[in-house]
Image (cartoon, rainbow, N blue to C red):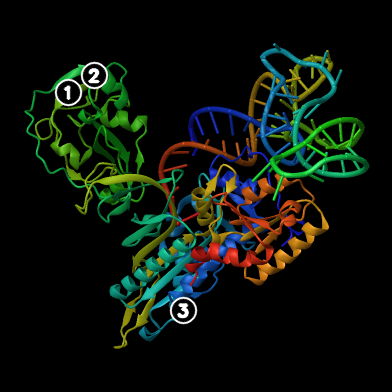
RNA sequence: CGGGGCGUAGCGCAGCCCGGUAGCGCGCCUGCUUUGGGAGCAGGAUGUCGGAGGUUCAAAUCCUCUCGCCCCGACCA
């Protein structure tokens, strides 16, 4: 492909709208352009990358025995009402009416549609197991789209759904997808880690997220350095502290804490460590107000709280509710003397002695407060986020924390959707059985963006060979007949050897071509100039290392084959 | 939705506080020179100053409303 035939609008300066590396570089290198918030056009070069990622996904999904189909983007409300998600999904579900005033939505995921297909078309246990996948545009009306392709409202996703006769079969299907994902992300040239995850809105029994390790990641994961445990912090279990606390209980007393409302204010004012405080968070569940006690240096985990309460949606109570429940303004809530409110507490509160809590009076706290003697707790549970330094719940070491970008997610769904939608098959005895399901997603654009986050330098992108838009970037310097002729012969030879080449045939100065090539990030650049040709060589520049090899033009295909051998090995 | 910020030429920005002919750099067009890391000189084109309303002799600038976008928090591939 010649650049003169390609819309490739590279930008010299960083666009004002982008702050993240991948977003900035994808705009600058002419891969994407924004149409509206979270909605992008893929320009020709960007689409090539998307197609490369899709190609790898297809190969691995097919290898794992899944079959590709394609479901519609618009789906009727009826299906979503059957599973209850028409109400449950919230504003993220983009709804609209057709000309007959019938309700529709843009598919954010496709459990309903695929389960509907299954129940209509599959009858017998002989047809199972089945695994269907599609690579398709999804729409989720995200509260806050950001970082370009990292979190779009419209985005391309590979989603797959497995149907098995039983739990055991479903576990096999799940494992096959888990293995396929390992291969996919490895082939995309990513450093990643599979971690235990929460099941969120999709529901189901267990799941893993595939996290690309990057500082700009929105997720925090914890893992055991010495063991195998790895989990999203929102999921990671925290073991109850083992040691009992021998500290003697001192008598409780009130102290004045004028206008000190936050943990930080109170600890500074009383000159104590945050771990000496217990914070009292009041949550509205829709039915009641619940007080959640968390040690001052710990972070509340709302997912765990929701799970404990068995409530899908909770929110921190507003000032009015807080005042009603505690009789004090926000910032002075505490468990002592708190009436008519259910109190749940994190395990760490149980062993904490002589702590500081709000007094349920303006500008006062209690110090030397002790559980059982001074306040009661209805239930203790694991309610906080894991953090670095906590023991691994598998008892295989101490947890470390890192940031990650979620590029894939696999779920064991169980029979949640088959029950709600009556997706059944007949077993050998002619008895109706619920299909046991799994579902498996990969964000295609996000995978590409994550690859940029992990593979770039100050000059631009450094594409991993398997997903590079072009393998080789030909840079003829000047317009002499010798250079043009040599470039043309190289272009053909490189193609014949199986490489995709981009030929910069613009009448630009060397510096412009070099900078654009570094920005676009093809793994190899071929620099053809009169200087080199005079002694019979051209230069092969390796983008990643900056290394330049002087090579006779006839030897270029072989040199490229050798250089790329290791990156291509993963293909087979 | 809450908090913060921004909308001025294709891109990056200044001008706004203190109202008075709309500017700079890059890119784009023409010509000459140059040609291995974002060239030089000369000439040129390009704006409903996000939109609507208001104040004023006069509004990019002040006021009100509105739309869009970005960043930080609750959602997720």
Task: Name the spot of residue A432 as percent of width and height, x first.
Answer: 33, 81
Task: Name the spot of residue A157 as percent of width and height, x first.
Answer: 52, 61
Residue in front for this viewpoint, A552 or A324: A552
Residue A137 appearing in the image: no
Instruction: Tell me which residue sits at (73%, 46%) in the image.
Output: A510
Q: Quadrant of residue A137?
A: bottom right
Instruction: Name the mark on residue A533.
Output: none
Instruction: Name the mark on residue A270.
Output: 2
| Dots 2, 1 in contact, CB < 8 A | yes
Alpha-carbon distance for marks 2 and 1?
Answer: 10 Å
| Dots 1, 3 in contact, CB < 8 A | no
Mark 2 or mark 1: whose residue is earlier in sequence:
2
Same chain for labels 3 and 2? Say yes or no.
yes
User: Is residue A522 shown left or right of residue A60?
Assistant: right
User: Is residue A137 shown left or right of residue A122?
Assistant: right
- SS state under label 3: helix
- A83 to B43, vertically: above or below: below
Mark 1 or mark 3: whose residue is earlier in sequence:
3
The mark lying in front, picked from 3 and 2, is: 2
What is the quadrant of the N terminus of chain A in the image? bottom right
Instruction: Tell me which residue sits at (62%, 70%) in the image.
Output: A498
- A157 to A26, vertically: above or below: below
Residue in front for this viewpoint, A86 or A157: A157
Crowding around mark 2 (Cα neighbors within 10 Å: few <14, some 14 to 19, many 20+) is some
Instruction: Name the mark on residue A367.
Output: 1
Q: Mark 3 points at which residue?
A: A120
């Amino acid at each position: 492909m010649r650049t003169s035939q390609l819309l490739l609008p590279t930008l010299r300066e960083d666009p004002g709208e982008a702050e993240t590396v991948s977003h900035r570089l994808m705009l600058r290198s002419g891969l994407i352009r924004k149409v509206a918030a979270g909605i992008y056009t893929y320009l020709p070069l960007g689409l090539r990358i998307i197609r490369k990622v899709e190609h790898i996904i297809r190969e691995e999904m097919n290898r794992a025995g899944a079959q590709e189909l394609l479901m519609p983007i618009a789906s009727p409300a009826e299906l979503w009402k059957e599973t209850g998600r028409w109400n449950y999904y919230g504003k993220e579900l983009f709804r609209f009416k057709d000309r007959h005033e019938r309700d529709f939505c843009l598919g954010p995921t496709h459990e309903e549609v695929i389960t509907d297909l299954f129940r209509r078309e599959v009858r017998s246990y002989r047809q199972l197991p089945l695994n269907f996948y599609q690579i398709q545009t999804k729409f989720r009306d995200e509260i806050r789209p950001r970082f370009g392709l990292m979190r779009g409202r419209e985005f391309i996703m590979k989603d797959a759904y497995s149907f098995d006769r039983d739990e055991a079969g479903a576990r096999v299907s799940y494992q096959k997808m888990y293995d396929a994902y390992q291969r996919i992300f490895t082939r995309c040239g990513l450093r990643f880690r599979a971690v235990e995850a929460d099941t969120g809105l999709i529901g189901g029994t267990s799941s893993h997220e595939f996290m690309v390790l990057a500082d700009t990641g929105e997720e925090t994961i914890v893992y055991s350095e010495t063991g195998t445990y790895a989990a999203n912090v929102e999921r990671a279990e925290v073991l109850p502290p083992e040691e009992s606390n021998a500290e003697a209980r001192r008598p409780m007393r009130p102290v004045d804490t004028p206008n000190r409302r936050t943990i930080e204010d109170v600890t500074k004012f009383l000159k104590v460590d945050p771990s000496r405080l217990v914070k009292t968070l009041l949550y509205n569940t829709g039915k009641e107000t619940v007080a959640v006690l968390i040690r001052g240096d710990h972070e509340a985990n709302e997912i765990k709280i929701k799970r404990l309460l068995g409530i899908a949606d909770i929110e921190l109570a507003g000032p009015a509710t807080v005042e009603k429940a505690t009789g004090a303004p926000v910032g002075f809530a505490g468990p002592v003397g708190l009436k008519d409110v259910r109190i749940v507490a994190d395990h760490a509160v149980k062993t904490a002695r002589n702590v500081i809590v709000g007094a349920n009076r303006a500008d006062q706290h209690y110090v030397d407060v002790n559980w059982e003697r001074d306040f009661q707790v209805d239930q203790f549970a694991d309610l906080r986020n894991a953090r670095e330094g906590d023991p691994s719940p598998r008892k295989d070491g101490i947890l470390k924390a890192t940031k990650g970008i979620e590029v894939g997610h696999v779920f064991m769904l169980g029979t949640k959707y088959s029950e709600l939608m009556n997706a059944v098959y007949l077993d050998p005895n002619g008895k109706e059985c619920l299909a046991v399901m799994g579902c498996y997603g990969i964000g295609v654009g996000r995978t590409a963006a994550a690859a940029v986050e992990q593979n770039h330098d100050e000059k631009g992108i450094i594409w991993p060979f398997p997903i590079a838009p072009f393998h080789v970037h030909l840079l003829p310097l000047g317009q002499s007949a010798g250079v043009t002729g040599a470039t043309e012969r190289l272009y053909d030879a490189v193609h014949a050897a199986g490489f995709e080449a981009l030929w910069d045939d613009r009448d630009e100065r060397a510096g412009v071509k070099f900078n654009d090539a570094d920005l676009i990030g093809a793994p190899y650049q071929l620099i053809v100039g009169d200087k080199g040709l005079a002694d019979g060589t051209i230069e092969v520049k390796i983008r990643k290392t900056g290394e330049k090899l002087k090579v006779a033009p006839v030897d270029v295909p072989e040199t490229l084959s050798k250089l790329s051998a290791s990156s291509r090995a993963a293909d087979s």
